[in-house]
Image (cartoon, grey):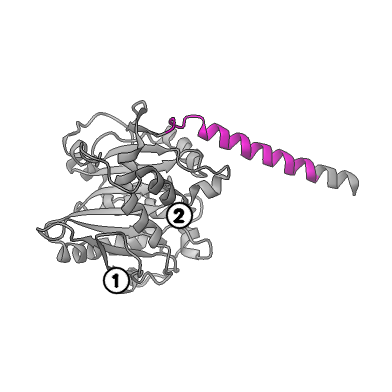
């Protein structure tokens, strides 16, 4: 009994040491104070000032956070300044006919009418993982475990054209953007792969699962403009899976243009807590400050996505 207890204690200590070591390893490449590390495709990272990036991402990360507020997906009462929630999940049919769809998918559609010329942007914000939802589990582990049920990627594939058409109907001339945190970041990227009307994605601490191999015609991505920002906190829990999969599936630098922006704004040791969207939003708020940064313009990435040059590379995501 004593030997068993000692062995169990030793395993616990070893596990804790491994977690600390892993966290230190994943944080080793963090940018310096007040900086972010930015890389495009497989290019080397460069340090840039964090404030304009934090100010850019703050409202979109907030919408990704609000996607967790209600399991039914109805519009939340809170909203980022200048934004209005138009619809939530109950307004859309997302289960393909004849299929069994477990619960779990959630999203909101937002518009920004701050411009005098009307709607400037429409945002589709997907919810991330709720560990109590079967659909979330099936979606997170779709590499390893497939069932007859339609997971959330399949539901998005069925419903995305209707969702985007609704967004376009209330924002005829605006830019359509998809956002999400964790699993929601994977769903946002998949939605953009499927519908060319989505021009940009902001994925926060995203899952490495993007269902890229389930896109019906992947070559069409090379014929259109699409930008993706994969934004994450250094050392959060999904850093290692993303790092490992990037070795097998190199990140694209053009069509789609994929920019990696790595922050270091969370003063927590726990890999799981560093992953939370609420913690990241708080970090963005502190980094951005009370006032938006002065010119030059925020580093949106849209121009780079429009003007980038296609080079030979690997796939743009992971199934």
Image location (x, y in percent) of residue 318? 39, 44
Predominant secondary structure in magenta? helix
Residue displayed at 45% across by 64% down: 148
Foreground disc of the pair 1, 2: 2
Viewer-closest of 240 and 54: 54
Instruction: Report which quarter residue 93 is drawn in.
Output: bottom left
Q: Which mark is residue 42?
A: none
Please say whether residue 192 is one of the residues in the magenta stretch: no
Residue neighbourhood size for the residue with mark 2, other residues' Cα within 10 Å, grouped as few (<14), some (14–19), many (≥20): some
Residue 214 pos. (x, y %): 34, 51
- What residue sits right under mark 2 in the picture? 278
Segment tinted magenta in the rendering: 8-33
Q: Is residue 319 visible?
A: no
Disc 1 and disc 2 in contact, CB within 8 angstroms: no
User: Where's residue 41, x and y in %?
Assistant: 32, 32
Q: Secondary structure at mark 2?
A: helix
* Mark 1 nearby-residue class (10 Å; few <14, some 14–19, many ≥20): few
The residue furthest right is 2
The residue at which mark 1 appears reads as: 92
Q: Secondary structure at mark 1?
A: loop
Q: Is 100 drawn above or below residue 273 in the view shown?
A: below
């Amino acid at each position: 009994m004593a030997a068993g207890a000692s062995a169990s204690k030793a395993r616990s200590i070893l596990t804790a040491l491994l977690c600390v070591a892993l966290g230190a390893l994943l944080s080793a490449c963090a940018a310096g104070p007040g900086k972010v590390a930015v890389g495009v495709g497989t290019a080397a990272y460069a340090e840039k000032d964090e404030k304009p990036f934090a100010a850019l991402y703050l409202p979109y990360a907030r919408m990704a956070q609000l996607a967790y507020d209600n399991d039914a997906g109805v519009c939340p009462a809170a909203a980022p300044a200048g934004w209005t929630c138009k619809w939530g999940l109950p307004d859309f049919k997302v289960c393909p006919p004849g299929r069994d769809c477990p619960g779990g998918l959630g999203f909101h559609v937002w518009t920004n009418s701050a411009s005098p010329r009307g709607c400037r942007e429409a945002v589709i914000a997907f919810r991330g993982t709720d560990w109590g939802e079967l659909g979330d589990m099936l979606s997170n582990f779709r590499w390893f475990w497939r069932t007859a049920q339609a997971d959330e990627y399949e539901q998005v594939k069925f419903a995305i054209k209707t969702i985007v058409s609704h967004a376009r109907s209330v924002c005829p001339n605006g830019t359509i953007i998809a956002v999400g945190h964790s699993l929601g970041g994977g769903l946002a990227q998949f939605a953009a792969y499927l519908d060319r009307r989505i021009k940009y994605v902001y994925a926060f601490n995203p899952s490495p699962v993007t269902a890229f191999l389930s896109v019906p015609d992947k070559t069409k991505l090379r014929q259109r403009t699409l930008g993706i920002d994969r934004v994450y906190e250094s050392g959060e829990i999904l850093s290692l899976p993303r790092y490992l999969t990037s070795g097998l599936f190199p990140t694209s630098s053009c069509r789609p243009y994929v920019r990696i922006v790595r922050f270091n704004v969370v003063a927590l040791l726990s890999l799981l807590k560093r992953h939370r969207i609420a913690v990241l939003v708080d970090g963005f708020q502190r980094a951005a400050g009370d006032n938006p940064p002065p010119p030059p313009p925020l580093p949106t990435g849209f121009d780079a996505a429009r003007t980038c040059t296609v080079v030979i590379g690997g796939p743009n995501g992971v199934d």
